[in-house]
Image (cartoon, rainbow, N blue to C red):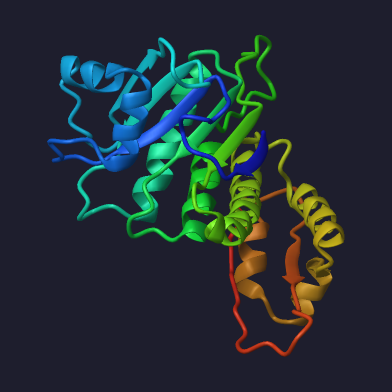
Amino acid sequence: MRVSLETRSPIEARGEVLLVGKHAEESRLSPGLQALDAALGGQLARVLAAEKFEGKPGQLSYFFRGSGIRAERVMVVGLGTRKTYGADAVRRAAAAGVRRARDLGARSVAVMMPPDGVPARLRSHVVVEGAALGTYRFDRYLKDKSDKAIETLTVLESERRSHAAARDGLGLGELTAAGVCLARDLVNEPANVVTPTYLAERAAEIAQAGKLDLKVLEREDCEKLGMGAYLGVAQGSLQSPKFIHLTYAPGRRARKRVVVIGKGVT
């Protein structure tokens, strides 16, 4: 999925689906949605009223636009109340909306979420993250794979002064989503594929790509360090254990040391 940032209004957004968020408990449309509704000749308000759209988290409503905007279809996703609105609400809304757009056969989606209370950098980050994780599929071993996929995702940021911050968030969202999807792939692979040796090989690939230091302790190394409990678990398998140690050292002096310990039962 190619990701981009555009400084334009929803009315000018290009894409098969325009995804916009709406808060609950609002009798009137927000100024941004009012402008979109005006361009659509009142079609947005009529559809939401007819469907009794309440703006509950994840609630979706969509329709083909008549005229007035560039996008072929408009999709509104509920964000919940303004009191509960935050990064998680945006992430969940993006996941639900982009997933439904994919299932409808769309290839491109433009997303505009309300700026209230969620800074541009964080907002673009969680939109990208939600879209990627919401459309994640593990179909490596399926004979008949679906050809439905979102090829391009455009995050709309109307304020030019927030463009740089939003672009930073875009990159961070792509990185975090890629990391989560890699973890999901490892979990979803069958046990006869993901052995300790396989994990060590993937760690080597990650280390090379991310310029990390890698140390893999073999059984003999663990015995010398007195790692009895660790080796006791490994005795139940024909596979040799691999204790994988990845280290990232920043270019500047680190303010603190963070250690993340994971147990991979393969």
Q: How many marks?
A: 0
Residue 96 picture quarter: top left
Which image quarter holds the N terminus? Answer: top right
Q: At which x and y percent is residue 31?
A: 29, 41
Residue that appears at 22% across and 51% down: 82
Q: At which x and y percent is residue 94?
A: 44, 38
Q: Observer-nearest residue: 125 or 243?
A: 125
Residue 253 picture quarter: bottom right
Residue that appears at 74% across and 70% down: 245
Q: At which x and y percent is residue 5?
A: 61, 44
Q: Observer-nearest residue: 140 or 191?
A: 140
Q: Observer-nearest residue: 233 or 193?
A: 193
Residue 16 picture quarter: top right
Residue that appears at 65% across and 47% down: 178
Q: Observer-nearest residue: 260 or 74?
A: 74
Q: Is residue 3 left or right of residue 247?
A: left
157 lies above or below 244: above
225 lies above or below 44: below
62 lies above or below 169: above
Q: Is residue 213 left or right of residue 8?
A: right
Q: Is residue 236 left or right of residue 207?
A: left
Residue that appears at 67% across and 58% down: 234
93 lies above or below 224: above
Q: At which x and y percent is residue 76?
A: 34, 28
